[in-house]
Amino acid sequence: MNIDKSIGIFDSGIGGITVLNEILKLLPNENYIYYSDSKNNPYGDKSETEIFNICDEIVKKMFFEYNCKAIVIACNTASTKVANKLRENYPYKKIIAIEPAYKMVYDYAYDKPTLVMATNGTIQSEKFNNLFKKYNNHKTYLLACKGLADLIEDGNDEKILNYLNDNISKYKGKVQNVVLGCTHYPLVQKEISQILGNVTFFNGAPNLAKHLKHLLQDEKSLNISNEIGKIVFFDSSNSKYKKERFFKYLYV
């Protein structure tokens, strides 16, 4: 496959597949390069400087080695911590970043009790805190889900259910909205529903997909082929298991 002029997507693991799947609904004819940085996973426990240096190397490779026409940061921690700095470093390149979906609660379900599930790095970030202060409905619980993304990466269903029971069961009956503030978390949305009951989920992936499509349309850089695009997967630790899990969740 010629990966020239593809759309690059990266995350600290396979969680960004939830973002890619939303993009594929709108842009099925594009070619994609997905980079799973499992070697440096998790990002949420790293300093901002560490996260920037890691992401800068990935972005540099995608733009100048793979010649991507746009890059999607499909990791909430990286987006909230270093997206703006990366844009400053590459001012003439298109970098789109997943956004915390808390504003969507304000727009669509402001008066309902809400649980925000995210990594500690996202919840502590200046970007998220500015968003939270601006749109706070004063009925919101913030939950730093330390280690949950790692469990989802590993795919141990029993450990995931035990973790969720231990950490979110106390919110059953107390919340009606759940903000999935990490791209891994939609992969266990069904399990979260089993514990919390009938809740409404919010995540930023659908809006990101719309934004990306509009951006490519405005710049007349959409792939006009009628053929379904190709997807290339890379993992920084060359894990066959990560690749298998990635393609398991593709188009789900």
Image: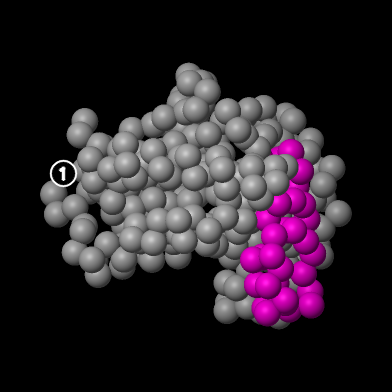
Q: Which residues are magenta?
A: 120-149
Q: Is residue 238 left or right of residue 187?
A: left
Q: Give coordinates of residue 63: x percent, y percent.
A: 34, 45
> Looking at the image, which is closer to me, 39 or 144?
39
Q: Is residue 40 left or right of residue 47?
A: left
Q: Residue at x 47, y 39 (%)?
A: 57
Q: Is residue 25 visible?
A: no
Q: Give coordinates of residue 185: x percent, y percent.
A: 62, 47
Q: Amino acid at mark 1?
A: Glu
Q: Residues within 10 Å of mark 1 (few under 14, many from 20)?
A: few
Relative height, residue 193 to residue 2 (above, below): below
> Looking at the image, which is closer to me, 151 or 174?
151
> Looking at the image, which is closer to me, 54 or 129?
54
Residue 51: in magenta span? no
Q: Residue at x 42, y 52 (%)?
A: 72
Q: Residue at x 71, y 68 (%)?
A: 129
Q: Is residue 128 left or right of residue 84?
A: right
Residue named by callout 1: 227
Q: Secondary structure at mark 1?
A: loop
Q: Is residue 223 visible?
A: yes
Relative height, residue 75 to residue 128 (above, below): above
* Numbered marks: total: 1
Colour approach in the figure: one colour
Residue 134: in magenta span? yes
Q: Give coordinates of residue 158: x percent, y percent.
A: 72, 29
Q: Give coordinates of residue 137: x percent, y percent.
A: 73, 78
> Looking at the image, which is closer to me, 252 or 99?
99
Give the residue furthest to the left.
225
Q: Is residue 34 left or right of residue 195?
A: left
Q: Residue at x 31, y 66 (%)?
A: 215
Res 139 → quadrant: bottom right
Res 166 → quadrant: top right
